[in-house]
């Protein structure tokens, strides 16, 4: 290489490095939008709206929240400019399941995944109005076990599929309007099993309306310490199939901007105002914003894909 050519290459490299540095220094310089692909008042919406003012204070730009429910909201994030100014708060497990049933206009794995504010502990229960008298009766059942779901396929429905695969029973999904209506469906005997947030079941466990099967996390939950965790049932490897209050962005956001947002989101999760929000709502607070988060998404996809035939048949 000639001296002139070498000098040109070095100059280009310096310019590229300067551009990257400038990108990091200048970002963000305009408002950031958080898209919530769920209805107002949902848990995802609550997490997004609580985080927005704190994130805005940390980054020194306005942060606004917009609800665009369903696939339209997910696609809005996916198709946005990959500049870090459009991000979202969503739950990937149910979306991965829906992708087994119908083509999606976006690739869940291709989103830029920053991490999550929390994984929501879910508890799976057996309705005491069901023909199955104990959780053990589910094993090797000849008839389909009816699992409650909502919004097409929920994370709880994916958990039902994982349990069906391990305990060898056929599955049928029953749609209810939302997680808040799941206990009513259990009391009426419309469903046999269901998995939603721990808090929703506590009163019904106490009055004997439902029988807990498992706390869908590796360990037990302090809110219901007598209920087995997945490790107690030798199923700890399924703990990743859960509800994520995850933060994602458009594919191919520059790495320096991803790092800035990930660091800011970590600061949000450690802010006193955030802790007050979590404590007042008795919400989960196991945040994780790290570089390897994309690997977690890939792992969930593999686990759900392994039960694709069962999920497709049950739906």
Image (spheres, rainbow, N blue to C red):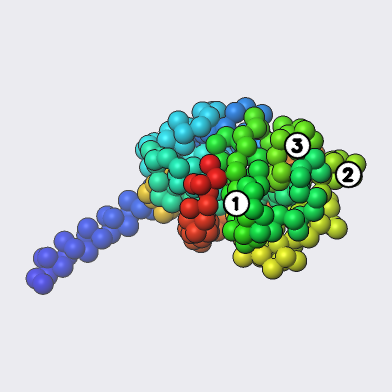
Instruction: Report the residue that reaches farthest toward the left.
Output: 2
| 218 sits to left or right of 13 | right
Q: Tag count in the figure?
A: 3
| 58 sits to left or right of 9 | right
Residue 272 in percent (x, y) is at: 74, 45
Instruction: Report the residue that reaches farthest toward the right.
Output: 207
Residue 292 in percent (x, y) is at: 51, 61
Of residue 4 and residue 283, the one placed in the foreground of this image is 283
Give SS at disc 3: loop
> Could you tell me if residue 7 is visible in this image?
yes
Reply above or below: 286 against 3.
Answer: above
* Residue at image coords 43%, 33%: 76
* Residue at image coords 42%, 35%: 75
Alpha-carbon distance for marks 3 and 1? 18 Å
Of residue 144 and residue 204, the one placed in the foreground of this image is 144
- N-terminal of the two: label 3 or label 1? 1
Q: Which residue is mark 1?
A: 170
Give the class, few, some or many, for how many residues have Cα within 10 Å of label 3's Cα (few <14, many ≥20): some
Alpha-carbon distance for marks 2 and 1? 26 Å
Contact flag, marks 2 and 1 (Cβ < 8 Å): no
Residue 249 in percent (x, y) is at: 46, 43
Alpha-carbon distance for marks 3 and 2? 14 Å
Of residue 118 and residue 184, the one placed in the foreground of this image is 184
| 298 sits to left or right of 136 | left
Contact flag, marks 3 and 2 (Cβ < 8 Å): no
Q: Which residue is mark 2?
A: 208
Give the class, few, some or many, for how many residues have Cα within 10 Å of label 1's Cα (few <14, many ≥20): many
Q: Which residue is mark 3?
A: 189
Please tell me whether mark 2 or mark 1 is closer to you in this view: 1
> Could you tell me if residue 293 is visible in this image?
no
| 139 sits to left or right of 98 | right
Reply above or below: 75 against 91.
Answer: above
């Amino acid at each position: 290489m000639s001296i002139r050519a070498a000098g040109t290459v070095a100059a280009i490299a310096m310019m590229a490095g300067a551009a990257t540095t400038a990108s990091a220094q200048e970002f963000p310089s305009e408002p950031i939008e958080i898209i919530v692909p769920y209805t107002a008042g949902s848990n995802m919406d609550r997490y997004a709206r609580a985080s927005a003012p704190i994130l805005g204070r940390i980054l020194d730009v306005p942060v606004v929240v917009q609800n665009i429910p369903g696939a339209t909201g997910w696609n809005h994030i996916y198709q946005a400019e990959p500049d870090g100014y459009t991000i979202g708060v969503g739950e990937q497990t149910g979306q991965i399941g829906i992708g087994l049933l119908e083509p999606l206009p976006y690739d869940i794995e291709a989103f830029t995944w920053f991490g999550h504010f929390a994984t929501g502990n879910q508890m799976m229960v057996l309705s005491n109005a069901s023909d199955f008298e104990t959780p053990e009766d589910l094993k090797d059942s000849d008839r389909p076990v009816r699992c409650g779901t909502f919004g097409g396929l929920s994370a709880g429905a994916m958990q039902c599929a994982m349990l069906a695969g391990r305990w060898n029973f056929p599955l049928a999904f029953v749609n209810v309007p939302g997680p808040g209506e799941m206990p009513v469906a259990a009391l009426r005997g419309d469903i046999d099993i269901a998995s939603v947030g721990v808090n929703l079941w506590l009163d019904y466990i106490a009055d004997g309306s439902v029988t807990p099967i498992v706390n869908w996390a590796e360990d037990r939950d302090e809110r219901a310490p007598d209920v087995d965790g997945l490790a107690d049932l030798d199923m700890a490897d399924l703990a990743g199939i859960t509800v994520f209050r995850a933060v994602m962005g458009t594919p191919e956001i520059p790495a320096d901007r991803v790092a800035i947002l990930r660091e800011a989101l970590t600061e949000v999760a450690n802010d006193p105002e955030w802790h007050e929000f979590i404590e007042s709502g008795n919400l989960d607070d196991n945040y994780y914003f790290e570089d390897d988060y994309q690997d977690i998404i890939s792992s969930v996809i593999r686990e759900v894909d392994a039960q694709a035939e069962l999920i497709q048949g049950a739906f």
